[in-house]
Amino acid sequence: MSQIINPMPDSHEPSQPAADHPAAAVRAAAEPERHGGHAIRNTIVALSLAALTALGIRALRTQNPAKGGPEAGKQFPVPIVAGVVMQKDVPLFLDGLGTVQALNTVTVHPRVDGELKDVKFTEGQDVEAGMVLAQIDDAPYRAQWEQAMAKKGQDEALLENARRDLERNADLIEKKVISPQQYETQKALVAQLDATVKADEAAVKNTKVQLDYSTVISPLAGRVGMRLIDKGNVVHASDTRGLVVITQIQPISLVFTLPAQNLGEIQKEKKRGAELEVLAVDRDNKTLMDSGTLTVIDNQIDTATGTIMLKATFPNRDLQLWPGQFANARLLLTVRKQGIVVPASVVQRGPNGAYAFVIKDDLTVEMRPVTVTRIERDEALIEDGLQAGERVVVDGQYKLQPGSKVKIPEPAPKGGAPADGHKPGISQK
């Protein structure tokens, strides 16, 4: 019988593969573990982790050049909004809060007692000076006036008769028909009757005044308010309520306050003979209600608040100002000719004071200190630090530092069309 040769090696005597065979490396790495080589295994794992970490860092640097990649040293431009320093006339205002007051306010009272027979005005009506507002029952006062007139006529007749008797007595005394005593008595009677007639004239005037007071007239031109008493009521001269209130609102006044330290500037402009303009602005500080002039500077400073009170007068043609209304007063102190002006957002604040980023010709920025006179209505008046025509950063300063490169966006095409020429609302295929 032929001998069968087993191709597989004996499990007790494993064959040794060639040294360059891949399996040999695996067996070599696994062999120490079978013999307890834990230190060599840990070293191999640590080297593998270090290699993986290095590969990860290289990948990150390739994706983000700013953190050590090939583009790390390159500075990218910062997008900003730019503006131009302008030069123009700038009005300088002093702002204060004021209250609108009627130029004149009158509460119309009855000046005689009696029944209110008629009310001749409509609530809210504009009235002229001398216009009849109400009528009080005048019958008693007319009777008194007529009685005084009659008494005056009676005494005038007696005076006339006494004067004629005096003339006759003058002729008789020359002829020595009457005694001097009789002549002097007649002369005294004439003087007495003359005084009586004068008293009668005063009584007539008094009763006529009372009669006239029964007709209530407007003392000034203005607008009447709500009626305070109705027709048919009995009114008295001693009543404190009155019949109606009339306010003069054309022109009208605005009383406002300013800090006492502004008084010197105001007086300086007044001494020049200038008529200081005052603007009445709504509480939103934007809506102009009327323009007037400063008329009164109070004669004392309020020591409790450190303010000075002023009054301005407005024509109020459109009736936008109303008594009791609150309004902002803007006193135009002077006009700064050819002032340097930038948007208020240009001015930044730092530890060393105000500054602005100025854009140079190479599109890098310079941090320049500036002196600000005042900021008003989103505009800053610059006293020193900027020149007209220079370009400054209006928005985007928080990303900048001195020497930073900036990028100024191109202006949008006119008409609102996109830069690629596509028309809004039409799809392009």
Image: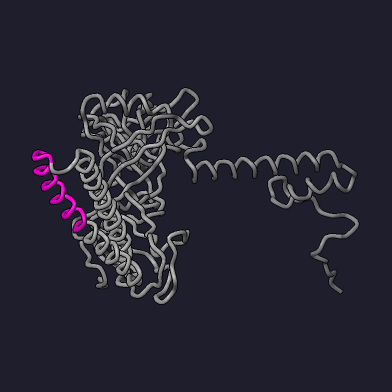
User: In terms of depth relative to the viewer, which is nearer, 166 or 141?
Assistant: 166
Residue at the (23%, 61%) spot, across then down: 154
Q: Nearer the viewer, residue 23 or 318?
A: 318
Q: Position of residue 47 (x, y in %)?
A: 71, 39
Looking at the rendered image, the quarter that the C terminus falls into is bottom left
Up/down of 49 relative to 243, above or below? above
Give the extent of the magenta segment.
Answer: 156-176
> Is residue 419 shown above or below 90?
below
Which x, y percent locates residue 120?
30, 72
Q: Residue furthest front?
A: 177
Q: Is residue 383 above or below residue 42?
A: above
Q: Residue at x 37, y 64 (%)?
A: 225
Residue 291 visible somewhere in the drawing: no
Give the percent coordinates (x, y) of residue 106. Answer: 36, 55
Tell me if residue 168 is in the magenta stretch: yes
Residue 312 makes an appearance in the image: yes
371 drawn magenta: no
The kind of secondary structure the magenta stretch mainly shows is: helix
The tally of labels here is: 0
Q: Colour scheme in the image?
A: one colour
Residue 361 screen position, x and y as percent: 25, 30
Residue that appears at 39% across and 57% down: 107
* Residue in front for this viewpoint, 360 or 57: 360
Q: Residue at x 72, y 48 (%)?
A: 18
Quadrant in the picture for residue 274: top left
Q: Closer to the camera, 285 or 329? A: 329
